[in-house]
Image (cartoon, grey):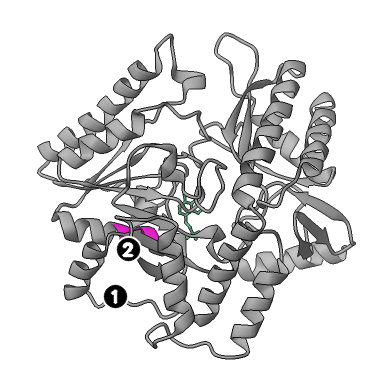
């Protein structure tokens, strides 16, 4: 038994045999730097998957900030501390009014839980609308709302899951406006159905980039119309930016700016601390204040001084290294390259995504565009064997999911594209 097999055995024994691991042959990583990850044999892998280390693995500005603060003071978030306040000011300034207050958490799950608590408190309703292929966290409530994989918790009677438009598959000759109207009608039907059951609206909880849904191209007007229907019924708009925030889309720092609607609540997570567990809820100050009158919300670790130091350092690097611009430029470069690959490989049905969050849908060229699920799985594993880490998503698990650290450059894109070309040729 190899050393890695022995470690796998130990892992199964202590973490259980269902604790997920990527790839048929799991990668045993020991070190990371920038867009590179290294295994125990010293082999380098180009990271085209991890959005959490958004400014690059082990960025020295972030690791220094964490180390310095950890060596100085780390306490419960209920003490007054300069860095925590400075971070809150700096973060909320990137949103601007009316999104001018923050409540800190440690995970995206906690942020979405808190957002739902806030929405229910302010509206007096309990009804929630999510998309019908979504994931927003692993608490009991959010697991029950999960629709993109099986969970033991039944889908709640106070919620409805609506389909969202994927123009590549659902257009059927319809214009963007017709598509937006048709899918907004599903939201109206969900609101009506909840009301018919005596459930008043609390919120629509969606990621406007629809990352877990498979990165469908945006249908202008859809989110705006959906939110309007929910607001007319008294509900709030919670925008889950756990994946689409922090310059990921290349268009703006925040994913909701892809639309013309301002959320009532935005939830943040994954990239916020570049791997340090830091997440939060951004909303209007009056919502935080009213909630605070009756709820003694605190989060022991949420933005403690070390977390705040990590969060501030991440914002520094995004600004100093112009990572929003990089996300836009390199993202456009990759998309062009993927379009070229599409002309060469018939298995690529379409190219999707924007900024440094892109994908290709793999499907057969038959009348139904049958999803090439098995081929996508093989491709993900073949890319891993060739030293490139990526994954797959979507209803049919046939969309290659690529979401590298924001320091991804054109030379890395070239390596990704040429490796993808070879792997597709040999699939
Ligand atoms: C869109 C979205 N929201 C929320 C979460 C939950 O975040 P966490 O794993 O930090 O609890 C995830 C995790 O994958 C996610 O993709």
User: On the rendered structure, is 65 left or right of 300?
Assistant: right
Q: Quadrant of residue 105?
A: bottom left
Image quadrant holding the C terminus, namely top right
Is 38 situated left or right of 218 in this image? right
Query: Can residue 274 be seen in the rendering of this structure?
Result: no
Q: CA distance from mark 2 to mark 1?
A: 9 Å
Checking the image for residue 114, the label placed there is 2
Quarter location, residue 330: top right
User: Residue 278's x, y, as percent?
Assistant: 50, 68
Q: Is residue 114 magenta?
A: yes
Q: Would you say residue 383 is visible in this rendering?
A: yes
Occupied quadrant, residue 197: top left
x 21%, y 64%: residue: 286
User: Would you say 325 lies left or right of 288 here?
Assistant: right
* Element at label 2: helix
Q: Earlier in the sequence, mark 2 or mark 1?
A: 2
Answer whether residue 13 is magenta in the image: no
Region rendered in magenta = 111-115
Q: Residue at 83% across / 35% down in the picture?
A: 419
Looking at the image, do the residues carrying marks 2 and 1 touch, with CB atoms under 8 Å apart?
Answer: yes
């Amino acid at each position: 038994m190899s050393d890695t097999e022995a470690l796998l055995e130990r892992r199964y024994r202590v973490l259980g045999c269902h604790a997920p691991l990527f790839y048929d042959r799991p990668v045993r990583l020991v070190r990371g730097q920038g867009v590179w990850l290294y295994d125990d044999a010293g082999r380098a892998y180009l990271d085209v998957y991890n959005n959490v280390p958004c400014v690059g693995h082990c960025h020295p500005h972030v690791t220094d900030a964490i180390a310095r603060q950890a060596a100085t003071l780390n306490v419960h978030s209920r003490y007054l501390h300069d860095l925590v306040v400075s971070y809150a000011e700096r973060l909320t300034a990137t949103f601007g009014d009316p999104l001018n207050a923050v409540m800190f958490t440690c995970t995206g799950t906690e942020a979405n839980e808190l957002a739902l608590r806030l929405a229910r408190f302010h509206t007096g309703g309990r009804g929630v609308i999510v998309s019908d292929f979504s994931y927003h966290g692993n608490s009991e409530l959010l697991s029950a709302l999960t629709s993109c994989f099986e969970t033991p918790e039944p889908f709640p009677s106070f919620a409805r899951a609506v389909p969202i438009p994927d123009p590549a598959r659902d257009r059927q000759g319809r214009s963007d406006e017709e598509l937006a109207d048709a899918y907004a009608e599903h939201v109206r039907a969900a609101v009506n159905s909840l009301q018919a059951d005596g459930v008043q609206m609390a919120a629509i909880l969606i990621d406007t980039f629809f990352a877990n849904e498979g990165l469908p191209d945006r249908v202008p007007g859809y989110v705006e119309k959906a939110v309007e229907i929910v607001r007319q019924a008294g509900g709030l708009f919670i925008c889950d930016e756990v994946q689409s925030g922090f310059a990921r889309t290349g268009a703006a720092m925040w994913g909701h700016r892809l639309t013309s609607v301002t959320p009532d609540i935005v939830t943040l997570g994954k990239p916020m601390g570049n791997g340090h567990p830091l997440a939060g809820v951004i909303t209007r100050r009056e919502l935080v204040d009213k909630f605070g009158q009756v709820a003694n919300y605190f989060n022991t670790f949420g933005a403690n001084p070390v977390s705040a130091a990590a969060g501030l350092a991440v914002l520094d690097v995004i600004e100093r290294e112009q990572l929003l611009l990089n996300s836009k430029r390199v993202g456009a470069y990759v998309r062009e390259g993927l379009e070229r690959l599409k002309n060469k490989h018939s298995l690529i049905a379409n190219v999707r995504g924007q900024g440094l969050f892109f994908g290709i849908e793999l499907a057969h060229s038959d009348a139904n565009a049958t999803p090439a699920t098995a081929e996508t799985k093989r491709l993900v594993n073949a890319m891993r064997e060739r030293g490139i880490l990526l994954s797959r998503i979507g209803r049919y698990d046939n969309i290659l999911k690529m979401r590298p650290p924001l320091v991804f450059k054109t030379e890395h894109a070239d390596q990704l594209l040429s490796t993808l070309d070879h792997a597709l040729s040999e699939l």
